[in-house]
Image: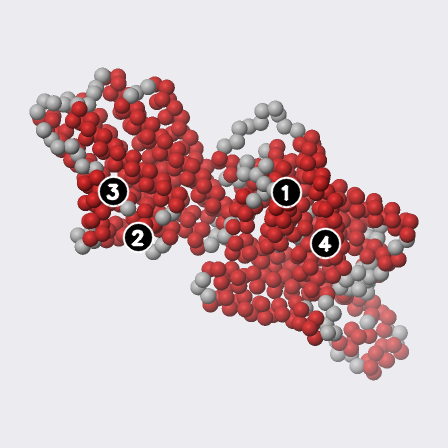
Amino acid sequence: MTVYFFSHGFEARDLNLLWRKGQYAVYAAEMRGNMDIFDVLSMLGGLALLLYGMEVMGSSLEKLSGGRLEKLLERMTSNRFKAVLLGAVVTAAIQSSSATTVMVVGFVNSGIMKLGQAVGVIMGANVGTTITSWILSLAGLDDSNFFLAMLKPTSFSPLLAAAGIILVMFCKSEKKKDLGSIFLGFAILMFGMNAMGSAVSGLAELEGFQNLLTLFHNPFLGMLAGVVLTAVIQSSAASIGILQAFCLSGIVTYGTVIPIVMGQNIGTCVTAILSSIGAKKNAKRTAAVHLYFNVIGTAIFMIVFYALNAALDFAFLDETANAGNVALIHSLFNVGATIVLFPFAGFLEKLAVFTVRGTKEEAKEDELQVLDTRFLDTPAYAVEQCKNVTLSMAQLARKALFDGIDLLGNYEETEAGELDDLENLVDRYEDELGAYLVKISSRNLSKKDGRTTSKLLHCIGDFERISDHAVNLGDAAKEMQEKGLKFSDKAAEELAVFTRAVKDIVNLAVEVFESEDTNRARAIEPLEEVIDSLSRRVKSRHVKRLQNGECTIELGFVLSDIITNYERVSDHCSNIALCILQMQDDAIEAHEYLDALKKDGNEEFRHDYQKLKEQYCLPEQI
């Protein structure tokens, strides 16, 4: 306390005067009271910075990865060893085991991942989260050695903060901005850790604070404190950071640290459990696996450790622990629990299935399940899932169109009913994709993902309209069947050429959407122009046949409907191609692009147009 007086401007004669008057003890008590309030406020501020820094760093790492980590998890979890490794790598990269576990719950809920695959990833996530505790432990390095002092966050965090703000403010590249945000997040995180450590150092002198830590020396109470703290802030890494900050005070013992760390591992399961509420049975089982892994691992550790302590009386439990010791205990537990329970992964899966029982026939899975709201926290991956689902929608729309065309030649009531069902399914795809894409657009997206989201919203509308035109063709076929109408041989030949061109442009549009090949996308507009030309010529030839009495007005109406629907389908294919081009280059403006493409001076377009015109040449008139 004397040091405190000197640091606040008191001189020796002032202290002697206070001492002689018997006021030193009273003033010291008042100062300790003030320190209590302000240190608690400083600790809360440091905690806020720690949590915010972790959020900024984690979200920026996720954004920089562009969804690649999630796709890696999705594709490479068939082998359980690989699943553990990938779970550890992804968690270490995004600095959150909770985020990884919630993501896995989403994978299982949407049918992307099996429950058995998820077990390995969850084990790996518990190992990966230990990296964060080692990073945070840097705050407790001894600064008496120059090289160790340079590793302390207080030494290099300002440099990272400076580099980060330069990248964020002055770089145009989005990847460099994300890298800058990672640097800033790390610096904020470390400043928060340092602020908490400084605040706790002041609190360490308070008798009430010391009594609280002594209370947590009880294994049950310490474990309960760890569970509650981690459950409230929903981040085991941040919870470990708080414990490490307390250790900087120099009065926290191993006997206090060990049960709290054990409780923190159980408390981190709360996030996954909350995420599984309202999800399907397997998603709830995934959260249960996470809980069982940590509860069983903690139970084994606590029973064995304290049984040995009763027999051997570990003297080190009364020794003070530092931030590095906390990281070591955290790592030893998670790595040890993974090694011990890995052979029993199947048992954990069966235990989860036994706990969360399902009906004999659970709901049939469909591809729209991958549009899981849990993936919105990793928007880059959510956008990728939307692209995959939109591709499925495109293939359904194409099938609907081809089925509608087939009905023109051979109408069957059963096939017409199936066509209606298919069109309704495409409508459902549009509704759910549209709602999901709107949710994604409100998230923190990269420029590329934002552009993709916008263009996907346009594409799903075009694919849905193609399925509508398929139903229109089915209606035309039904009218022909009911009225006994049939095209003449010449009209049928012309319509066959027209149909071939329409099928080809739809196939090309779906292929372009899947591959995002801009060269192939540019090939659609010349074919669309040929289809427009075919439309005019088929109509002109029909009028001549009508004048010669070779065709009826009633059949002419049906033919006009077919031609109109064909032409509209080709227009939607043109829109899809343009969206693909704009995904790659947002500077492309639709009307300007089309005008420039069709100018007389565009030799490449003229050449492609003439070549396609010859390919889809109508038979000669007789």
- Give the colour scheme shown: secondary structure
| Residue that mark 4 sits on | 331
Residue at horizontal 34 percent and vertical 56 percent from the top: 587
Distance of mark 4 from mark 2, alpha carbons? Answer: 54 Å
Q: Quadrant of residue 206?
A: bottom right
Residue contact at pointers 1 and 4, CB within 8 angstroms: no
SS class of the residue under badge 1? helix
- Dot 1 or dot 4: first in sequence order is 1
Residue contact at pointers 3 and 1, CB within 8 angstroms: no
Amino acid under disc 3: Leu
| Residue that mark 1 sits on | 80
Distance of mark 4 from mark 3, alpha carbons? Answer: 62 Å
Looking at the rendered structure, which numbered label has been put on residue 527? 3
Q: Is residue 179 above or below residue 348?
A: below
- Dot 4 or dot 2: first in sequence order is 4
Amino acid under disc 2: Glu
- Dot 3 or dot 1: first in sequence order is 1
**Residue 359 location, x and y as percent?**
62, 25
Other-residue count near label 4 (Cα within 10 Å), few / some / many at <14 / 14–19 / ≥20: many
**Residue 551 location, x and y as percent?**
14, 23
Residue at horizontal 72 percent and vertical 50 percent from the top: 335
**Residue 57 location, x and y as percent?**
58, 58
Distance of mark 1 from mark 4, alpha carbons? Answer: 21 Å
| Residue that mark 2 sits on | 589
Residue 572 seen in the figure:
no
User: Quarter holding the N terminus?
Assistant: bottom right
SS class of the residue under badge 4? helix
**Residue 320 location, x and y as percent?**
82, 61
Residue contact at pointers 2 and 1, CB within 8 angstroms: no
Residue at horizontal 58 percent and vertical 68 percent from the top: 160
